[in-house]
Amino acid sequence: MSERNISRRQFLKYAALLSASSAFAASCAPAAAPAATPEVKVVEKEVTRVVAGTPEVVKVQETVVVEKEKVVEVTTTPAAAQVVTIRYLARAGAAEEVLYAQRIGEFNRDNPQYKAVLELIPGGNVEYDPKILALYAAGTLGDALWTAIGTGVHYLLAHKGITEPLDDLIASTKTDLSQWYKSSVEATKLKGKMYGLPLKAHAGGAYIY
């Protein structure tokens, strides 16, 4: 194995080239990513310290990390007001139908929280009275209805508990009963309680002996 001797001048030359190569390699290396800077805030807070045996409140500064809050606005849609339906059953008839359409329209206009619906039953009293009893037995009678005193169905429904007395409702709504004939008001009563409000009145049969 042969040995190669180099002079001191050549050694210094090679050392300088080696150092230059190392420096170049370091300059070509990718730069390190800068560290993320946290958001900080300097705040003051009160602390208590004992000075010469006496508590003393002093303010000191403290560096804290502040987290940003994100405010999310939630929009809600209010629920629509519920409309209550009132079913009114009545005997079909030309004169009554005109009156019902007028009064029910006025009621619905003045009371938007309610919706009165007219359900007419044709066939006169012969069909009306049995139909009311059948609807009651089936549990689908409705909320309000027309009755007749002349046929006795008004008292029959009140006696069986199918209709309810209106005295408390009349008192709470301050209904003026003087707008009807007193005889008509009294005719709606059974055992001293009112089971309806007069709709119309007419004379019955008159006989002369």
Image (cartoon, rainbow, N blue to C red):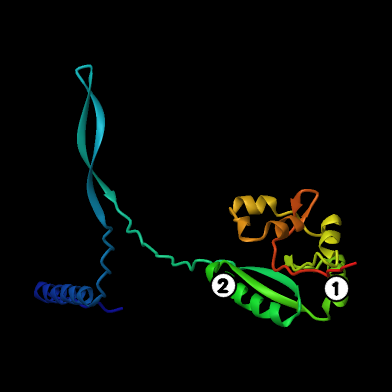
Indicate the secondary structure of the residue bearing disc 1: helix
The kind of residue on which mark 1 rests is: Lys
- On residue 106, the disc is 2
Question: Which quarter of the picture shows residue 36?
Answer: bottom left
1 or 2: tag closer to the N-terminus: 2
Question: Residue sitting at 24 percent across and 72 percent down?
Answer: 31
Q: Is residue 170 left or right of residue 186?
A: left
The kind of residue on which mark 2 rests is: Glu
- On residue 91, the disc is none
The residue labelled by disc 1 is: 131
Quadrant of the frame with the C terminus: bottom right
103 and 176: which is toward the camera:
176
Question: Residue sitting at 27 percent across and 69 percent down?
Answer: 32
User: Residue 168 appears at what percent x and percent y?
Assistant: 67, 50
Q: Is residue 50 left or right of residue 150?
A: left
User: Residue 197 appears at what percent x and percent y?
Assistant: 69, 61
36 and 21: which is toward the camera:
36
Residue placed farthest to the bottom in the image?
94
Vertical placement of 98 versus 84: above or below?
A: below
Question: Residue sitting at 25 percent across and 75 percent down?
Answer: 29
Whole-number angstrom distance, CA of label 1 to CA of label 2 = 28 Å
